[in-house]
């Protein structure tokens, strides 16, 4: 689970981490249906594009302390988001999440894991 500490709102219930070149390269490109209540954390990552994406997404740029450096809402296919100084991670979430959770520059995100789920895997 990822929450916005400043607003107290849940960003997504579940997320996956793309921490290799291959995982970052493919990201959400192979998905045909929009993501729902899940996200993808690209790390390390400084910028993204949405070429070949089948649906719009929200994109949150984070620094090494998981502070929001920039937040983009409803990024459609074939867009290129520039790198922003200080970005270490990029979080891709369902379209509308940024507005619904009030996420903006300077907010802190917190990543919580369900330890029971992790132990049983």
Image (cartoon, rainbow, N blue to C red):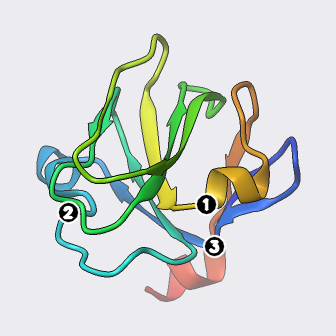
Residue at horizontal 65%, vertical 50%?
98
Instruction: Tell me the distance, in whole angstroms, between the alpha carbons under discs 2 and 1.
Output: 19 Å
Residue most extreme to the left: 22
Give the residue pinned by disc 2: 29
Q: Position of residue 80 (x, y in %)?
A: 27, 33
Asked whether 20 or 78 is in front, the reply is: 78
Q: Secondary structure at mark 1?
A: loop
Quadrant for residue 96, please give it: bottom right
Which sits earlier in the primary sequence, circle 3 or circle 1?
3
The residue depicted at 19 percent of the width and 55 percent of the height is: 23
Residue 47 to residue 27: above or below: above
Rendered-image quadrant of the N terminus: bottom right
Badge 2 local density, few (<14 within 10 Å), some, or many (20+)?
some
Seen in the picture, residue 88 relative to 58 is either above or below; the reply is: above
Of circles 3 and 2, the one toward us is: 2
Q: Quadrant of residue 68?
A: top right
Of badges 2 and 1, the one in the foreground is 1
Q: Which mark is residue 96?
A: 1
């Amino acid at each position: 689970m990822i929450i916005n500490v400043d607003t107290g709102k849940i960003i997504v219930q579940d997320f996956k981490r793309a921490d290799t070149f291959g995982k970052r390269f493919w990201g959400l490109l192979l998905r045909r249906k929009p993501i729902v209540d899940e996200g993808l954390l690209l790390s390390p990552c400084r910028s993204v594009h949405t070429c070949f994406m089948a649906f719009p997404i929200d994109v949150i740029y984070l620094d090494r302390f998981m502070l929001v450096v920039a937040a983009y809402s409803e990024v459609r296919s074939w867009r290129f988001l520039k790198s922003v100084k200080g970005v270490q991670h990029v979080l891709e979430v369902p379209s509308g999440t940024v507005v619904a959770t009030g996420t903006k520059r300077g907010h802190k995100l917190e990543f919580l894991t369900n330890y029971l789920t992790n132990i049983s895997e």
